[in-house]
Image: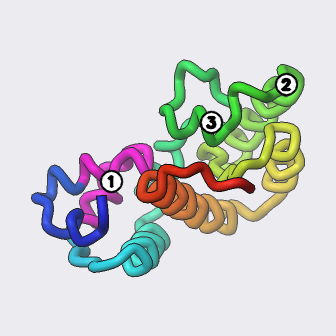
């Protein structure tokens, strides 16, 4: 669905159409709907990033936590996350390490680790989570919110152009 079509939808239909890109997050999606019209893809995702960055922290955490944990059990994630996280090709050891790191990250920062996987394997993501453990909490919120929008933009592009992009 193109952005001009999204702009013309009633609010509830706009939210339903865009929710899969952001894994839900109703308060964010309501604000995004209220910010229309966007007119094109670039303006849509720039505005989505601005709205996400300006949300009060509880709403930013809702947006971040709407995404499944990195390495979550395959039956608990959306179809988009299943493909993005490469469940069909990953190792058990990396999954166990990510589970441990997710728990440590959530205990330290108080919210779920969310990252734009962007074709990286689970073993490639282990050092990314390890580095994030020592990061400043506010910086992690900013990074995760930006990654949520990057994930949504990537999902939009994949839907708009169904030919798989080689990374």
Instruction: Judge left or right: residue 44 versus residue 121.
Output: left
CA–CA distance in space, label 3 to label 2 = 16 Å
- Callout 1: helix, strand or loop? helix
Residue indicated by mark 2: 91
Mark nearer the N terminus (1 vs 2): 1
Instruction: Judge left or right: residue 14 versus residue 99.
Output: left
In the image shown, does 51 or 12 lie closer to the viewer?
Answer: 12
Count of numbered circles in the view: 3
Q: Quadrant of residue 11?
A: bottom left
Q: Position of residue 59 (x, y in %)?
A: 41, 57
In the image shown, does 135 or 161 lie closer to the viewer?
Answer: 161
Q: Main secondary structure of the magenta part?
A: helix
Residue indicated by mark 1: 18
Specify whether residue 60 is in view. no
Q: Quadrant of residue 83?
A: top right
CA–CA distance in space, label 1 to label 3 = 20 Å
Per the rendered image, the range of residues in magenta is: 15-33
- Callout 3: helix, strand or loop? loop
Residue indicated by mark 3: 69
Looking at the figure, which quarter contains the C terminus? bottom right
């Amino acid at each position: 669905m193109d952005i001009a079509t999204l702009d013309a939808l009633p609010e509830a239909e706009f939210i339903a159409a865009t929710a899969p890109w952001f894994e839900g997050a109703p308060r964010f999606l309501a604000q995004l709907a209220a910010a229309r019209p966007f007119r094109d893809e670039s303006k849509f995702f720039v505005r989505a990033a601005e709205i996400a960055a300006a949300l009060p922290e509880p709403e930013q955490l809702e947006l971040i936590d709407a995404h499944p944990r990195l390495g979550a059990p395959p039956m608990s994630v959306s179809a988009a996350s299943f493909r993005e996280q490469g469940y069909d090709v990953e190792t058990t050891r990396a999954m166990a390490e990510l589970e441990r790191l997710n728990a440590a990250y959530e205990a330290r920062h108080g919210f779920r680790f969310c990252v734009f996987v962007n074709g990286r394997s689970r073993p490639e993501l282990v050092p990314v989570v390890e580095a994030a453990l020592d990061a400043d909490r506010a910086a992690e919120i900013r990074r995760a919110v930006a990654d949520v929008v990057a994930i949504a933009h990537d999902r939009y592009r994949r839907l708009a152009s169904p030919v798989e992009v080689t990374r």
